[in-house]
Amino acid sequence: MPVKKRKLPDSDDQKHKCKIASFARPQIRSVKPIGTETLFSSKRCLAWFHSYAGPDKVFGPEAMEKFCEDIGVEPENIIMLVLAWHLEAANMGYFTKDEWLQGMTILQCDCTERLRSKLDFLRSELNDPVAFRSIYRYAFDFSRDKNQRSLDMDTAKSMLALLLEQRWPLFPIFQQFLEQSKYKGLNKDQWYNVLEFSKTINTDLSNYDEDGAWPVLLDEFVEWQKTRPALS
């Protein structure tokens, strides 16, 4: 999960969290805590949070790097995006106290060891089509600058690589198309439709309907790809 070092939004920006929380999220399976000798403790969970955030109500990029080191996951690992989705984190690179307590309570994690034991579970959710679709959609608002309606192209390409590089055979070609295109970013409709395109359109583009309700971006990608051999 790429880490952006930017200022925290003011309280007015909290309204964006409502958009994130409005996504249709799959019901999270109940996960038993490690062992039976101790139950989940909200107090211990908050102490764990404050070990990174200190007296503040949020920890940012520097604390996030230390947190990732402690759980043994690179900040750019997609598992960090899955974790942020569980916490319903509103801003990339930041976890607030409320986000932390709500998400970690659902996961039943109140210490580093318990979260480490859940990493395989978090990874497995990427293989659930419903969960993956929700994570993919969540990534748009999570990673965009909140004063922009669209996702800037550099961030869009990074997030698409994180989410689709291992899932979509045409992704390297689509990335090339984006790099040479006129587009400076992706809006939400384009972002959502890229996933649907990757799931439903054959790699040879033989079942692509030019009269379908695809964004112009994808019409142009198909046209660009089909004319490449003639240009080579």
Image: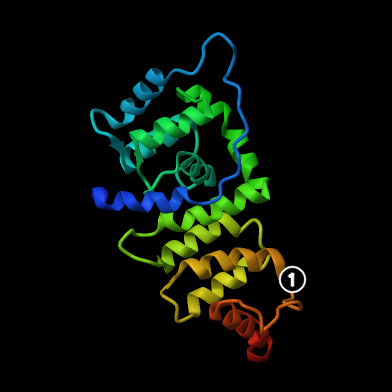
Image coloring type: rainbow
User: Mark 1 highlights which residue?
Assistant: 202
Residue at x-position 54% and y-position 78%: 217
Quadrant in which the C terminus is drawn: bottom right
Instruction: Compare residues 8 and 157 and report the one nearer the observer.
Output: 8
Apparent side of residue 63 relative to residue 203 in the rendered image (left or right) = left
Residue at x-position 46% and y-position 64%: 156
Apparent side of residue 47 relative to residue 210 in the rendered image (left or right) = left
Residue 7 visible from this viewpoint = no
Residue type marked 1: Asn
Instruction: Compare residues 89 and 162 and report the one nearer the observer.
Output: 89
Question: At which x and y percent is residue 188?
Answer: 48, 66
Residue at x-position 30% and y-position 37%: 58
Residue at x-position 51% and y-position 74%: 178
Looking at the rendered structure, the secondary structure element under dot 1 is loop
Residue 197 visible from this viewpoint = yes
- Crowd rating for badge 1 (residues with CA inside 10 Å; few <14, some 14–19, many 20+): few
Instruction: Identify whether 127 is placed above or below 137.
Output: above
Instruction: Compare residues 191 and 212 and report the one nearer the observer.
Output: 212
Instruction: Identify whether 230 is placed above or below 182.
Output: below
Residue, far top:
37
Question: At which x and y percent is residue 159?
Answer: 49, 58
